Image (cartoon, rainbow, N blue to C red):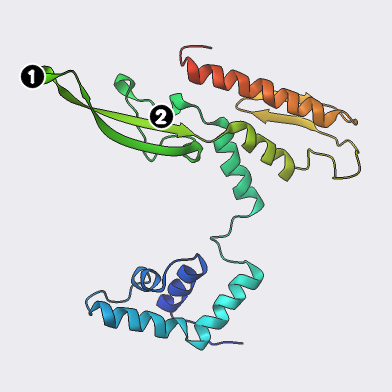
């Protein structure tokens, strides 16, 4: 059993485990940034070779016990946010894009860019700020949810599964047991996705 790491060493190791560069993990762990770049890089490299750090890193990789690794429930929550996300969630006062800590379904955002465009010509030309928001595909997330919850038949068996009741965005889909359960579920999801796409094209549509 390896000796317990110091809090800074533990945070540094977690940073490496998440794929961060040595120097980034070193500084984020709380080590002093006041020394020269060369000294900081040397210290970060030396710490990466520390026996206790290496053992802890191996343990994290083997058991995947670190909190940064998504468990099934977290994955389901993320995909649920994507599936439920609607462009109107991100529109605030004056029909402007508004994203805050309280904005619902933020994981649904795939791209978020703000840029300036010129409107008009000559002396009448003005700069306008434009914000572009692109959302993830909700159908794909719904399919991933179904896989995680075991709604699809096992590969190669062709056996149906008991779908039960699936609630998405306050809508209920009830599908019974049988070989055609998968097809029924996919049809319901596609119908739901079509309604969502219509709402995106026309936010006033109900």
Q: Which residue does the image show at 40% across and 70% down from the upper left?
A: 25
| Residue for badge 2 | 90
Residue 4 seen: no
Residue 49 position in % (x across, y down) = 47, 85
Q: Which residue does the image show at 11% across and 17% down from the upper left?
A: 124
In the image, taking residue 85 as reference, residue 189 lies left or right, namely right
Residue 123, which numbered label?
Answer: 1
Res 163 quadrant in image? top right
Residue 181 seen: yes
> Judging from the image, what secondary structure is the residue with disc 1 in?
helix
Q: Which residue does the image show at 80% across and 39% down from the upper left?
A: 152
Mark count: 2
Question: Where 32 sits versus 107, above or below?
Answer: below
| Quadrant occupied by the N terminus | bottom right
Question: Where 49 sits versus 25, above or below?
Answer: below
Q: Residues within 10 Å of mark 2 (few under 14, many from 20)?
A: some
70 and 159: which is toward the camera: 159
Q: Which residue does the image show at 27% across and 76% down from the upper left?
A: 32
Residue 82, which numbered label?
Answer: none
Residue 30 position in % (x across, y down) = 33, 72
> Judging from the image, what secondary structure is the residue with disc 2 in?
helix
Residue placed farthest to the top in the image?
Answer: 205
Q: Residues within 10 Å of mark 1 (few under 14, many from 20)?
A: few
Residue placed farthest to the left in the image?
Answer: 123
Which is nearer the N-term, disc 1 or disc 2?
2
55 and 124: which is toward the camera: 124
Residue 149 position in % (x across, y down) = 74, 42
Question: Where 75 sits versus 138, above or below?
Answer: below
Q: Does the residue at mark 1 contact the one at mark 2 (Cβ under 8 Å)?
A: no
Residue 101 position in % (x across, y down) = 38, 41
Res 15 quadrant in image? bottom left
How far apart in space, not on screen, are marks 1 and 2 (Cα)? 34 Å
């Amino acid at each position: 059993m390896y000796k317990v790491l110091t809090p800074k060493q533990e945070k540094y190791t977690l940073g490496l485990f998440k794929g961060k560069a040595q120097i980034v993990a070193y500084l984020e762990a709380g080590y002093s940034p006041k020394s020269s770049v060369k000294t900081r890089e040397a210290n970060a490299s030396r710490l990466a070779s520390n026996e206790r750090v290496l053992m802890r890193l191996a343990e994290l990789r083997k058991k995947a016990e670190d909190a940064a690794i998504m468990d099934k429930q977290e994955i389901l929550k993320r995909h649920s946010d994507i599936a439920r996300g609607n462009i109107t969630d991100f529109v605030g006062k004056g029909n402007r894009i508004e994203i805050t800590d309280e904005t619902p379904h933020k994981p649904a955002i795939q791209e978020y860019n703000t840029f300036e465009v010129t409107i008009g010509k000559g002396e009448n030309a003005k700069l306008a700020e434009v914000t572009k928001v692109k959302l993830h595909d909700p159908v794909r997330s719904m399919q991933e949810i179904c896989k995680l919850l075991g709604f699809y038949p096992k590969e190669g068996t062709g056996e149906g599964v008991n779908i039960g009741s699936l609630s998405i965005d306050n809508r209920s889909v009830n599908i019974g047991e049988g070989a055609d359960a998968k097809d029924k579920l996919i049809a319901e999801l596609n119908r739901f996705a079509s309604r969502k796409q219509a709402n995106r094209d026309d936010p006033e549509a109900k």
